[in-house]
Amino acid sequence: MTSDDLESMSVLGDPVRRALYRFVAEQGRDVGRNEAAEATGVQRTLAAHHLDKLVDAGLLEAGFRRLSGKAGPGGGRPAKVYRRVREERTVSLPPRDYRTLALVLAETVDLLGGEEKAEEAARRAGERLVASDAASGDLLEVLRARGYEPYEEDGRVRLRNCPFHVLADSHPLLVCSMNLALCEGLLAGLGENGFAATLDPRPEECCVAFTPSKNNVD
């Protein structure tokens, strides 16, 4: 943990900022001030103030875009928009460094050629996570609890966030295959046969998506 990380997290202590951050993060796209204000029930000027504070803290990034979608004359002036930054923030008291150990373990699996064993372990871990969580309910609830930020699109469940982003950047093949196996384990633990976990990567999203299984398609 760095002092910058701690200061960034302290900004979210304000309930209005926290609500604005959550709304922007959940959209997965550029959000204008008017939209954010309406969604959180605050005035536009207040929303603008807090959104800029979140930018100063490094939690959001800002830019300018024409919200009308029109280019050229008549498209209106570019408006200030916000989206969540990709940079990860970690706060731990006292400081812990699980990231470095995870990177070492991932490299060890690569060196030993243990990908299949790693996938088996990840699948079992997914089943155990569901079994150990007494509050687990449906698939979306379990995915939210694990930090995947699921959303539905055209009958599929997609994942806006990859909880293993740092490792996926350095060891994409290993981590994505383990992530898929983990999600398969979550489905098995839930007894969920209406969906199947598949690899369907999108830029800035998780590599796994859940598609309706053949048994669930009329």
Image (cartoon, rainbow, N blue to C red):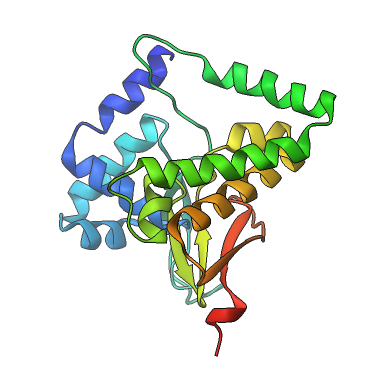
Q: Residue at x 55, y 50 (%)?
A: 185
Q: In the visual, does 113 lie left or right of 76?
A: right
Seen from the viewer's position, the closer of residues 118 and 199 is: 118
Residue 208 location in percent, x, y? Answer: 61, 55
Q: Residue placed farthest to the bottom in the image?
A: 218
Placement of 67 over or under 62, stated as above or below: below
Residue 10 location in percent, x, y? Answer: 27, 25
- The number of discs equals 0
Q: In the visual, does 121 lie left or right of 191?
A: right
Seen from the viewer's position, the closer of residues 144 and 139 is: 139
Placement of 149 over or under 94, stated as above or below: below
Q: In the visual, does 185 lie left or right of 38?
A: right
Q: Residue at x 47, y 56 (%)?
A: 28
Q: Residue at x 57, y 80 (%)?
A: 215
Q: Is residue 205 visible?
A: no
Quarter of the N terminus within the rendering: top left
Q: In the visual, does 119 lie left or right of 80?
A: right
Q: Quadrant of residue 12?
A: top left
Residue 218 location in percent, x, y? Answer: 55, 90
Seen from the viewer's position, the closer of residues 62 and 126 is: 126
